[in-house]
């Protein structure tokens, strides 16, 4: 009997070419795909919003977001995705749909989205200029502060966008895009960033 | 290469250290950095720059801005050739190439200028009156001929090699224009702490200050501009955008702007865009777009060398280029005199000032006596000159006498029109002000205010005051409370005007120079009943050209007012619509062209399929493998037929991940599905799948698909590929609005799962290779319509469904999407002993037609469940969406067109979808039309073309021979109506 290998392949595996792209010189934009993550949608059942919130608080040590934002816990990020629902994003294997099931048993429905999205992080001193070509959201530092989030669209494609913690004094914007749209949006992002110079990379780790 | 004979030796805002060579109509010239093409042509003494639209009259440069009607050129060459570019706004760059338009064989000798001889017949409405008959000649003969003779530049005719993009910007206050009002507004708003965007059309900041100078806060204007810009640039939340025109205003405080990022270079640098379209979201907008000087209409007013007085100052002061040596000035207002002052200061001769007003100020009288030129009270009645420019000017003096003035340039000032475009785009109608004889903004969109000259305040002091106050107010309204600091101050010049629109005289007097509309055309329109300004515009084409009548609209309606005996405000203005300046379609398209026209979706096995040489088809946004050609196959049909045969005799697989997939969670999930499907789902056992059909509220079929119950409170619902998004929306609407009492959640998992159909008699054997040995896939252990989680060899878990679209023993297997490509590879390995064959959407379609399954062509938004032969699925034990309306008389009528199988009597004949079904012996036509062929394929099983159709009473007519009438393809042939299930009608194969 033949051996079967179950290799995972990110939806950006083929499109992403690590290294410099576009204009030469100091890159204004850094695009990083994060590949190894678990993502679970948590939806409070009818009348169980408080119970769900308590369960989240107990497990993650932070309050789940009730407005469009992302809340960083020690080992997960809770991202608002609608009224009484949020996404739990964690390093691959940390919070799987199986491991979350007992936590929210009876209070919330869970849907595994770990393979349904690609996760791209955008930083660099031209990140805002580049994102302004794709997003109608006002990303001014005073308006879209750390932890701000939006369920919005880029290039006619639904995305979840939030601002992560600053890295090396620079803002970091994270976005989750549906996996089957990822390659298409990736090309649009490269096209939008090319004039600023891009550093492309991928990472297994959720920062 | 010629020198620049008309360049002044000093002054001007040009960089004399950077000479630029350029070509106009094949001739080489030199200009300087800081020139426009127009100013460089002026410096080189070029007066003739184009031929007019209709009469091919010689034309020169009239203005120095984006209102230019005449000096339009083809800029650049080859794929970058850009027709109708205004020489007055085109920045000069090294190597610029431009050509004049609408002339043949040359600008100097233009054959079509013969049109002028026929001018009496080329009046307004000429085309409508002349080319009426025969009607069919219009498209074939008249229109092409007219288009060749009349017109503007030639498009490049090939794909634009440059990139364009679009971007969003957000601010508290957006300001249009960087003249004194705009800069003052920006200073006030920015000092208050507001986020400010300042848009300037020009490449230099300062507006009219660049040409007219002045003193602000005791400083020369240029110095004040430098300081103001430095102050603004030092503030982090101020963005100054030059080469950017704010062209439109849209709902919710969204503004459109076009940034000509690299139009001032021969080609954009690598990775850069040519132009960028901005959508600016602003809480407030200050329109400081200034005013446009207007011409006076008189005979010969289009002669090269006749120029707006303010434009002449721009060329002399800003560009140090002299449009003429001996200048006459024709004005009806105080401001025009500045041109005389400028000319004298530049050492040029002033031949005369012709002032239409009864009085001239003592200061100007003394200027005239010092300058040694006469002041003539009266009007210019005609101009003597031609393609080489103005020679002599005839003046009708007040009182009736005549005078002649020799000059090679005539500056004209008929007053100023505030730029009311932006403020009028939401149907605001400008209002007339008698004191300045001009329309000023009224009814601006919410959040927008005009300031300075754009608001009818023509003095420098007033511009600064209005701009500053508007900027401060806008910042306050946006919630900013900082201090504005001190307001810049300057003196106010007096402005007096005696309106004068049209001087009667012999010869053509042009109102709209770009569209060759004369004063007599306006008078003719009035005589023929086109009095309304909107009719006047459409009948004469006044104001309809690329300049949108910026120099002509007000004069046109003033003449209409005069001939119809009404006042100007009674006559009214035409509706203003964006864009304020022409915007390239490429900028609106941005990134969305060619392969990026829309976003695309790729299946999890896409790159594997690419390796296999699949041919892809666009289905909605998806790229789907259509078939997998093999070496030696001559066409798609051969490949598809092979794939079908391989599945029916062995095993094949197909990526069906494009189906919509929805997790339905919650204790009420079953009850919810009972309401949205016509059949029951609450009764479905865990571990089972069921085919479901959902209706629209009106009783027509909406979508179908299989839904499986994975747990008591968890269903997995699938939709068709085409309706995936719509069904999700529909279900969310049902959940949130119709049935909020149900405890149910919906989550799209379309992208979470890679799903493959594995079909054929060997499907089970293939799967047994890949699933863990503990899994029982026997007919008893995993019967038809089973659904459960299975363990795969190597540890991965998958979902397995025993469902069949092909009519064969078939399964669908789902794995998390990142394993999709591995699944395709492993299916190839596992299936190798059984001759596994990947198949595409064509083979999928063939097998579903052979099996009589309905799909998109039958679920076409007009069919009922009964029409599809699925009426029995409609539960009578429960309510569901569409139940009541599906019972309407017409939807249950016995003569409805229903799904039936169709096969040609001649087995060699190809059946075509779209062919109409006509009873034998009847004449084709609407009365005898009984339906049509919806889906066709070549059936490898039957070895002939077969199809499905919607045919009146079709199920009762099995075996009847009818005609397939196909007028589109000119075909008419006999077909037999038959059972739509062509293959394995008792379903033994899929249950085996």
Image (cartoon, rainbow, N blue to C red):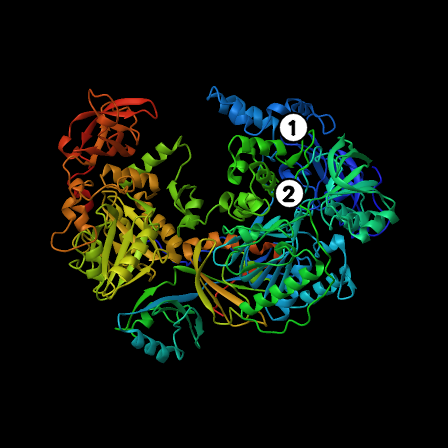
First reached walking from the N terminus: tag 2 or tag 1: 1
Q: CA distance from mark 2 to mark 1?
A: 19 Å
At mark 1, the secondary structure is loop
Please state the chain letter of the residue tagged with numbered disc 2 in the rendered image: B
Neighbour class for label 2 at 10 Å: few (<14), some, many (≥20)? many
Place residue B688 in its image quadrant: bottom left
Work out whether disc 2 and disc 1 sit on a shared chain.
yes
**Callouts 2 and 1 close, C-beta under 8 Å:** no
Query: Left or right: where does residue B118 sit relative to residue B217?
Result: left
Neighbour class for label 1 at 10 Å: few (<14), some, many (≥20)? many
At mark 2, the secondary structure is loop
Residue pointed to by mark 2: B551
Residue pointed to by mark 1: B55
Query: Left or right: where does residue B206 sit relative to residue B368?
Result: left
Quadrant placement of the N terminus of chain B: top right
Q: Return the mark for residue B558.
A: none
Query: Left or right: where does residue B476 sit relative to residue B715?
Result: right
Q: Position of residue B765 (x, y in %)?
A: 26, 49
Q: Which residue: 22% across, 30% down?
A: B930
Viewer-closest of B131 and A151: B131
Residue B560 vs B622, above or below: the answer is above
Viewer-closest of A140 and B303: B303
Query: Left or right: where does residue B603 sit relative to residue B331?
Result: left
Place residue B520 in its image quadrant: top right
Please state the chain letter of the residue tagged with numbered disc 1 in the rendered image: B
């Amino acid at each position: 009997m033949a051996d079967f290998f179950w290799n995972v392949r990110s939806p950006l595996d083929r499109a992403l070419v690590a290294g410099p792209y576009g204009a030469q010189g100091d890159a204004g934009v850094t695009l990083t795909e994060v590949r190894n993550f678990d993502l679970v949608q948590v939806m409070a059942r009818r009348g169980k919003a408080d119970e769900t919130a308590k369960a989240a608080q107990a497990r993650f040590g932070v309050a789940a977001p009730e407005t469009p934002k992302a809340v960083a816990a020690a080992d997960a990020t809770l991202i608002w995705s609608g009224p009484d629902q949020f996404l739990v994003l964690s390093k691959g294997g940390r919070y799987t749909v199986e491991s979350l099931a007992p936590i929210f048993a009876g209070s919330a429905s869970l849907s595994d989205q770990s393979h349904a999205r690609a996760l791209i992080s955008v930083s660099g001193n031209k990140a805002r200029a580049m994102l302004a070509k794709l997003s109608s959201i006002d990303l001014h530092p005073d308006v879209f502060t750390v932890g701000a989030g939006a369920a919005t669209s880029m290039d006619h494609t639904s995305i979840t966008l939030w601002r992560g913690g600053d890295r090396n004094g620079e803002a970091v914007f994270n976005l989750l895009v549906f996996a089957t749209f990822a390659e298409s949006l990736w090309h649009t992002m490269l096209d939008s960033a090319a004039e600023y110079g891009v550093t492309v990379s991928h990472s297994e780790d959720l920062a | 290469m010629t020198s620049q004979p008309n360049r002044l030796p000093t002054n001007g805002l040009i960089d004399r250290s950077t000479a630029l060579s350029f070509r106009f109509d094949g001739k080489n010239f030199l200009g300087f950095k800081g020139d426009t093409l127009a100013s460089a042509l002026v410096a080189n003494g070029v007066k003739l720059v184009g031929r007019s639209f209709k009469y091919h009259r010689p034309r020169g440069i009239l203005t120095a801005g984006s209102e230019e009607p005449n000096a339009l050129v083809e800029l650049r060459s080859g794929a970058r050739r850009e027709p109708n570019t205004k020489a007055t706004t085109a920045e000069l760059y090294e190597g610029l190439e431009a050509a004049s338009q609408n002339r043949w064989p040359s600008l100097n000798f233009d054959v079509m200028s013969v049109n002028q001889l026929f001018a009496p017949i080329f009046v307004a409405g000429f085309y409508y009156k002349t080319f009426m008959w025969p009607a069919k000649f219009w498209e074939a003969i008249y229109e092409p001929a007219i288009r060749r003779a009349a017109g503007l530049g030639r498009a490049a005719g090939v794909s634009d090699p440059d990139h364009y993009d679009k971007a969003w910007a957000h601010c508290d206050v957006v300001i249009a224009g960087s003249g004194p009002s705009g800069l003052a507004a920006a200073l006030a708003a920015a000092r208050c702490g507001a986020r400010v965007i300042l848009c300037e059309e020009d490449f230099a900041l300062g507006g009219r200050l660049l040409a007219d100078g002045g003193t602000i806060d005791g400083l020369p204007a240029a110095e004040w501009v430098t300081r103001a810009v430095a102050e603004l640039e030092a503030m982090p939340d101020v963005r100054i955008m030059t080469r950017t025109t704010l062209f439109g205003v849209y709902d919710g405080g969204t503004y459109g702007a076009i940034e000509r990022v690299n139009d001032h270079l021969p080609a954009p640098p690598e990775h850069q865009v040519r132009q960028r379209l901005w959508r600016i979201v602003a809480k407030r907008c200050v329109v400081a777009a200034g005013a446009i000087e207007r011409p006076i209409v008189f005979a010969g007013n289009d002669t090269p060398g006749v120029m707006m007085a303010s434009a002449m100052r721009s060329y002399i002061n800003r560009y140090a280029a002299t449009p003429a040596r001996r200048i006459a000035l024709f004005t009806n207002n105080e401001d025009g005199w500045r041109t005389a002052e400028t000319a004298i200061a530049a050492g040029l001769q002033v031949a005369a000032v012709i002032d239409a007003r009864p009085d001239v100020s003592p200061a100007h009288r003394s200027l005239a006596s010092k300058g040694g030129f006469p002041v003539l009270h009266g009007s210019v009645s005609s101009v003597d000159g031609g393609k080489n420019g103005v020679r002599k000017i005839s003046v009708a003096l007040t009182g009736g006498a005549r005078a002649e003035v020799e000059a090679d340039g005539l500056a004209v000032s008929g007053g100023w029109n505030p730029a009311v475009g932006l403020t009028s785009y939401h149907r605001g109608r400008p209002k007339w002000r008698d004191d300045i004889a001009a329309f000023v903004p009224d009814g601006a969109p919410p959040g927008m205010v005009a300031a300075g000259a754009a608001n009818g305040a023509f003095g420098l002091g007033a511009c600064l005051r209005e701009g500053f106050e508007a900027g401060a107010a806008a910042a306050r309204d946006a919630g900013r409370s900082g201090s504005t600091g001190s307001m810049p101050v300057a003196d106010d010049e007096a402005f007096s005007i005696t309106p004068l629109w049209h001087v009667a005289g012999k010869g053509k007097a042009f109102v709209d120079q770009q569209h060759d509309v004369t004063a007599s055309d306006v008078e003719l329109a009035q005589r023929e009943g086109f009095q309304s300004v909107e009719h006047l515009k459409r009948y004469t084409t006044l104001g309809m050209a690329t300049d949108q009548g910026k120099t002509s609209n007000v004069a046109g309606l003033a003449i209409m007012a005069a001939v119809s005996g009404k006042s100007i405000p009674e006559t009214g203005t035409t509706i203003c619509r964006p864009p304020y300046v022409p915007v390239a379609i490429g900028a609106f398209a941005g990134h969305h062209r060619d392969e990026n026209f829309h976003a695309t979706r790729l299946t999890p096995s896409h790159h594997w399929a690419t390796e296999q040489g699949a041919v892809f088809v666009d289905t909605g946004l998806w790229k789907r493998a259509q078939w997998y050609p093999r070496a030696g196959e001559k066409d798609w049909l051969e490949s598809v037929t092979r794939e079908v045969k391989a599945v029916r005799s062995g095993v094949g697989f197909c990526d069906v991940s494009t189906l919509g997939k929805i997790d339905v969670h919650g204790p009420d999930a079953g009850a919810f599905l009972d309401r949205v499907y016509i059949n029951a789902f609450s009764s479905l056992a865990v571990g089972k799948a069921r085919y479901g059909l959902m209706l629209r509220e009106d009783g027509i079929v909406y979508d179908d698909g299989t839904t499986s119950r994975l747990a008591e409170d968890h269903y997995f619902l699938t939709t068709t590929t085409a309706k995936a998004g719509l069904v999700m929306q529909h279900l969310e609407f049902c959940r949130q609005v119709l049935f909020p009492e149900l405890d149910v959640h919906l989550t799209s998992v379309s992208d979470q799962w890679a799903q493959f159909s594995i079909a054929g008699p060997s499907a089970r054997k293939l799967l047994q290779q890949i699933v863990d040995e503990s899994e029982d896939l026997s007919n008893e252990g995993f019967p038809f319509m089973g659904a459960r989680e299975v363990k795969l060899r190597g540890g991965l878990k998958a979902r397995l469904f025993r469902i069949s679209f092909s009519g064969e023993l078939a399964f669908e297997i789902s794995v998390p999407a990142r394993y999709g490509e591995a699944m395709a590879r492993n299916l190839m390995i596992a299936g190798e002993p059984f001759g596994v064959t990947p198949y595409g959407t064509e083979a999928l379609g063939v097998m579903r037609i052979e099996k009589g399954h309905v799909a998109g062509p039958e679920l076409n938004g007009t069919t009922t469940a009964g029409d599809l032969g699925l009426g029995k699925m409609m539960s009578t034990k429960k309510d569901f969406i569409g139940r009541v309306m599906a019972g309407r008389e017409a939807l249950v009528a016995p003569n409805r067109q229903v799904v039936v199988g169709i096969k040609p009597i001649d087995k060699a004949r190809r059946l075509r979808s779209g062919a109409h079904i006509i009873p034998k012996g009847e004449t084709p036509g609407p009365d005898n039309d009984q339906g049509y062929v919806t889906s066709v394929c070549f059936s490898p099983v039957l070895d002939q073309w077969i199809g499905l159709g919607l045919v009146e009473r079709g199920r009762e007519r099995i075996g009847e021979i009818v005609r397939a009438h196909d007028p589109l393809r000119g075909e008419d042939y006999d077909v037999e109506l038959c059972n739509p299930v062509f293959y394995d009608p008792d379903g033994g194969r899929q249950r085996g």
